[in-house]
Amino acid sequence: MFCHYVVQMTSITIIGAGSAAFSLALTRDLCATPGLWGSTVTLMDISPGRLEIAKTMVEQYRKEAGAELTIRGTTDRRAALKGADFVICCVKIGGYGPLEAERALAEKHGYYRGIGDRVSCYYGGVGAYHQLKFFLDLARDMEAVCPDALLIETANPVFEGATLLTRHTKIRTVGICHGHMGWKRLAEVLGLEEKRVSVQVAGLNHCVWLTRFTVDGRDAYPLIDRWIQEDAERFWASPEYRDAEFPWLIEQISPGAVDAYRLYGLFPIGDATRSASPWWHHTDLDEKRKWYGRDGGFDSETGWSAYLSKCRRAITDIEHAARAKDIPLLTRYPPGHSGEQHIPLIDAMINGRELILELNIPNRGAVPGIADDVVVEIPALVTAGGPQGVMVGTLPSRLMDNVILPRVLRMESIVDAFMAGDRTALVLQLMDDHRTGSFAQAQGMIDALLSQPWNTEAAAHYRAQR
């Protein structure tokens, strides 16, 4: 169904490919990118059952689309890495079960909705240990098996993980997230056609801000100001906002997002509406509802429950689609680009296309006031030689002083604690939480988390320090 031509073959490995929805999204993008036909896609997951479902779907979709791609599957990570040019990591160690148990434990210690960012699943457990260790182990395997491959880090925490890997391994690493696309919702509410809008979004992963916003080449921030003054209250009282099925559909244009704009000087985009929002937006469910709508936002007890239910339904639908023979996959999942940046990045590098993408890469002067080796999320020009960051310019001082630099320091603390195995550093991180009333409370929280059976390895890693 696509014209058939091959520019250059490449080898793409997806680690954690048992996430069938994500693997299918990348396959759709590959099938819609004839310049990458002839390539080999290796799906790797430690779960044979999930891997088989994903491989069945990907192979069937490829056949229906008529795309010339070789699909392989394996549970052996090193075998999956052999010959890889690009490695996409989308692994979440342990799934959501331990995270939910840790959240419940934290609430018993006085930490409503758990500790860390005001977003539910970024760290993957206490001290981010499980995720960071996996990232480092994967990079070490790549150094041995495919040292010239590009690692595309998709699994959270992207900020800590990509910074860790660029500093402590020889593997080229790029982080990718799709939260920056939240500007489209803002433009929609303002009644703007996307093709007339130009934006620049920059900051840190899950903490990005609208640094430039124009319509037909003219500054569009005054349109935001006018909407806030004249239309926002009416919109927040409308069924479109009040009765939205999922909280993530409205957070971008919520009172919380507007309040952050007023406080820090730029409009927050995507997950920044929560993860970079003031702590006083999140003291309890009633306060969350005030700022983020009926469900209290994506990470509230109601919003997060809705998200988990949606995930379970999506998994069920995908498993059914993988086994069903009566309805073609192309009917269920029509051809087209998913909106993810992974395949466009690979296409640009392999086929020499110049493309601007939003990537997580070392700063190297793009955002003044941030160290060169800190990974920032900024627009980058991608060519055959790889991504080159676009100079963003100075951010407002209130944003830098109250959000960006404290977030950088927290990243540094998380990475330092991980590299040193420093348990006291984890306690000191928690001492900065406004809910902590004493050192004993914070120490008890960390000890309780590390005493859980799934954290045995983490407890041995984070040794008690004096």
Image (cartoon, helix red, strand yellow):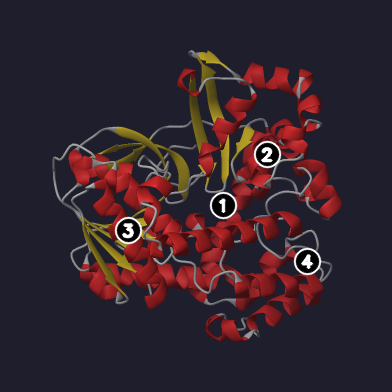
User: CB atoms at circles 2 and 4 under 8 Å apart?
Assistant: no
Q: Quadrant of the C terminus?
A: bottom right
Q: Which of marks 4 and 1 is nearer the N terminus?
A: 4
Q: Earlier in the sequence, mark 2 or mark 4?
A: 4
User: CB atoms at circles 2 and 3 under 8 Å apart?
Assistant: no
User: CB atoms at circles 3 and 1 under 8 Å apart?
Assistant: no
Q: Nearer the viewer, residue 128 or 437?
A: 128
Disc nearest the viewer among 2 and 4:
2
Identify the residue position indicated by label 2 in the image.
Answer: 250
Q: Name the spot of residue 357 as percent of width and height, x first.
A: 38, 37
Query: For this view, does 36 lie left or right of residue 124?
Result: left
Q: In which quarter of the image is the N terminus?
A: top left
Q: How far apart are marks 3 and 4 (CA)?
A: 42 Å
Q: Nearer the viewer, residue 113 or 3?
A: 3
What is the number of the mark on residue 111? 4
Q: What amino acid type is highlighted by mark number 4?
A: Tyr
Identify the residue position indicated by label 3 in the image.
Answer: 58
Query: For this view, does 121 lie left or right of residue 290?
Result: left
Identify the residue position indicated by label 1 in the image.
Answer: 408
Q: Name the spot of residue 8 as percent of width and height, x first.
A: 13, 46
Position of 432 relative to 205 (above/below): below
